[in-house]
Amino acid sequence: MSDLPPLGTPRLFSNPRADHERAYGPSERAILSRAAFDEAMAEIGAWPGYAPTPLRSLPGLARAAGIDRIWYKDEGSRFNLNSFKALGGAYAVLRLLAREVQARVPGVPVTALDLVVGRYGKITRTLTVTTATDGNHGRSVAWGAQVFGCNCVIYVPAKCSEGRQAAIESYDARVVRVDGTYDDAVRQAASDAAANGWYVVSDTSYTGYMDTPRDVMQGYTVMVEEAISQLPTSERPTHVFIQGGVGALPAAVCGHLWESWGRQRPRLVVVEPHSADCLYRSAVAGRPAKAEGDLDTVMAGLACGEVSLLAWAILERGADDFLTIPDEAAVATMRLLADGKHGGRPIVAGESGVAGIAALLCAAADPEVRLGLGLAPDARVLVFGTEGATDPEVYQSIVGRSPDAVVNG
Ligand SMILES: Cc1ncc(COP(=O)(O)O)c(C=O)c1O
């Protein structure tokens, strides 16, 4: 562990409701299922530019952490949007538009290609999708709206970076900056949508709003299936460290691994910033609970104060542990990956994207947490690097070099 920089102290809560013996049953399958995954995979896999993102082995960092393997699923190149979120929001926009067109032109199946070529443009151009975002989900929804041909209004919290706002606007979406947190932006989007007859395409679910967030989560499972097929068959991971904001991502990872591998699934550790810990608090309370304070963290994509109810329905029994980390862990890990200290080539990873691997390194360095998580020398850990430099200026201010300079040496 000696060649790792100081990473700060993690906080662990092992989930007393976790049930590793429980079969993936009808209540879970009503949220995420192999059948709905097959549909998402067939659809997203046919989009121009689709390619599985790389799964990188990081032997140097595994050695430094005193474990056998680390696999890092690198989402930095996903559909030029630089994050896994490209799989969820855009897919949900497509599903929503197809449903709305079908409701107006009954009996005719509506394909993605129909929407891309504008066959139903007279209908879709009258429709507006909207969502709240810390950056990445809104970018995916705006991209989907542009590709599939509808209008788009995106709500961002006061602290959203200018760079992330500009990236959303580059897909012709209108951006509204809310004077408050991500959760305030969620409420503003919902109330403006109700007043204007817009369609909410949110990644978080709440009472009375479940269908679209389910599509978003199902889109994410494409990434999980790719990782399954890229892992060596004889070396299943013993642990997965996966970061959460509202929890849709960890629930998608948890649900898909649970349905695919049953009891043989790895121990699933949900990771959040210390200061935006709604999933951790929900696990402690045994029901959905809110984070407190201003949710201030460098891990902007994880700055959420309220859990998605659908996500919680899976994580409540499916997640084994909840771990929170300080910002310094994310910052130090971004620099480590940029330096190529893991023994391979440098990796460009954004603030929220590194949270899972940062948590692993933090946990490995803390004897009590290490023991609590069963991180033995033969542990094999899968992490998801969920974003690249989604805001290049923020990236440079943290790492000290631009993403291009990191890649090109
Ligand atoms: C890069 C990145 N990773 C992880 C997450 C967490 O996803 P979720 O909010 O679905 O839990 C987000 C959310 O925006 C994100 O942008």
Image (tube, helix red, strand yellow):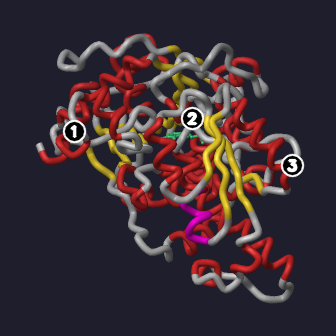
Q: Is mark 1 within 8 Å of ligand 1?
A: no
Dot 2 and dot 3 residues touching (CB under 8 Å): no
Left or right of 62, for residue 14? right
Looking at the rendered image, the quarter that the C terminus falls into is top left
State whether residue 403 appears in this view. yes
Magenta-drawn segment: 142-148
State whether residue 232 appears in this view. no
Figure quarter occupied by ligand 1: top right
Q: Which mark is residue 194?
A: 3
Query: Which residue in the protein does label 1 denote?
Result: 59
Q: Tag 2, which secondary structure?
A: loop
Q: Which residue is depicted at the point 74% across and 85% down?
A: 109
Is the residue 401 above or below the residue 278 in the image?
below
Q: Is mark 2 within 8 Å of ligand 1?
A: yes
Is the residue 216 above or below the residue 93 in the image?
above
Q: Which residue is depicted at the point 58% across and 63% down?
A: 144
Query: Which residue in the protein does label 2 denote?
Result: 244
Q: Is residue 43 magenta?
A: no
The answer to which quarter of the image holds residue 172 is bottom right
Mark 2 surroundings: few (<14), some (14-19) or many (≥20) residues within 10 A: many
Mark 1 surroundings: few (<14), some (14-19) or many (≥20) residues within 10 A: some
Left or right of 368, for residue 311? right
